[in-house]
Image (cartoon, rainbow, N blue to C red):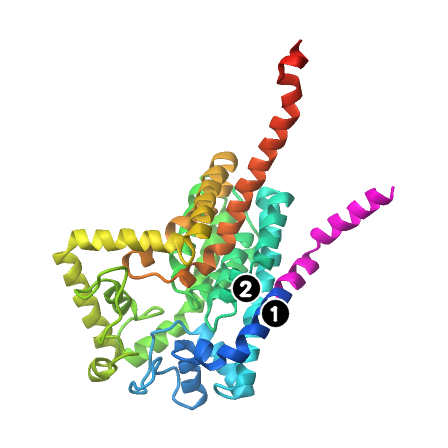
Amino acid sequence: MKVAAILRANTRLLTSPTLIFLAALLTRVSVLWHLLPAYASRGFYEENEPARIAWCIVSGFGFSSPWPHTTIAPTAQQPPVYPWVLAGIFKAFGSYSYTSLWVAVLFNALLSATTAWVILRLATRDFGLPTALVAAWAWACWIYEAVVSIRLWESSLSSLFLVSTMLLLPRPGENGSARRWLMLGILFGLGILTNTTLLVVFVGFYLWLWIANPQRSKSFSRGMLLSAGVCLLVLMPWTIRNYVEFHKIVPVRDNFGLELWIGNHDAVTYLFEFNGGFPLLDPAEYNRLGEIAFMEFKRDVALDFIRKNPFKFLRLSAQRFFYYWSAPDRYTWIPLSLLSWAGAFLACRRKGSPGCPYAIVLLSFPVVYYVTHPWSTYRHPTEPVMIILASYVVVSLAGRVREWKSLAPTLSPSSRA
């Protein structure tokens, strides 16, 4: 009886959302405790574009100048949400102060710990409790995820937006309430204004919702229109601001030309190359042309390189593909990436349409990085999904092993005799 009671108590602890959240938060705070004293300025503030824009906002220059030594002028190099979050922290606790850094990274840690809770709910709904527990505890306690999540970047917020929208997506056959569609539209809009790469994923979600419900009721169609309309309303103020500042339609960001150039120009030998044309290293060209003309010039250089070197572009894209799924440690990330792709295949095969959003994330989110340039940290918003899918495969394999073991005595020669 005591053993059974202990097992029940341990099961309650393992499945406790509060405990998973606290474990995730403790892991991230312990990482902060070790990293911040030694790397506060060099590892977090130095060359950080959102922090530079936040300083400009607090200093009265508006949303401007993502790089030092550049002309202080309006910018759309970053999406607006995270720089404005940092600006609020700078306003309250001081620009580039140690206190502000602690507040900012603790905010990221809270977001990432909340993501563990959402992972638990999402995976429980779609794959069952065993998969959910493996995924949530892996996210909570993995030091790598803790380190990446506390960067002074939008990654933790983007991760939370992505898994939250997946949790809100109506299942095939569900109409969804007006409130649910409204929240989905708001989250889609804020997610895009946080990490513009999520736009492709969210468009994929809308297409899936439409295709997965061929017999669409009026309430479902109205809900989708409401969600899309609210998303556009959330985006509109920033698009209007950009048009006023640049006299050009810039829906969210204007930096695609620069990102394309970083990975595709004559000096590139592997993946990408930063040289004198990058404003952080040499701002002269950026200052001379202004932001929009500079971005367009870099885009034209990159497109000309691609036209003249199509096979080199394909080779570089293949290298970027491999890097995206294997960095920073190929012995960890190649197996995990393969498991996540296997999990997406298994989810679509076993669960049909409800498994498709997971495949949409893996297929759509990385595409822009294949053609521009990747950092391993760019993958972070999708890593909760990857961990859920990998956990699904592991739990499924464990279930098969248990089945085989239970069948083994009945299949042995001695048992048949």
Task: Return the mark for residue 30.
Answer: 1
Q: Position of residue 248 (x, y in %)?
A: 26, 74
In the image, the segment drawn in magenta is 1-25
Q: Residues within 10 Å of mark 2 (few under 14, many from 20)?
A: many
Q: Does residue 207 appear to the left or right of 89 in the view shown?
A: left
Q: Where is 337 relative to 97, above or below?
A: above
In the image, what residue type sits under mark 2?
A: Ala
Can residue 254 be found in the magenta stretch? no
Residue lying at 52% horizontally and 82% vertically, measured from the top left: 88
Nearer to the camera, 16 or 212 = 16
Q: Position of residue 357 (x, y in %)?
A: 47, 47
- Residue position marked by numbered label 2 in the rendering: 146
Quarter of the rendering containing residue 53? bottom left
Image quarter hosting the C terminus: top right
Residues marked 2 and 1 touching at CB (< 8 Å): yes
Residue lying at 41% horizontally and 68% vertically, measured from the top left: 235
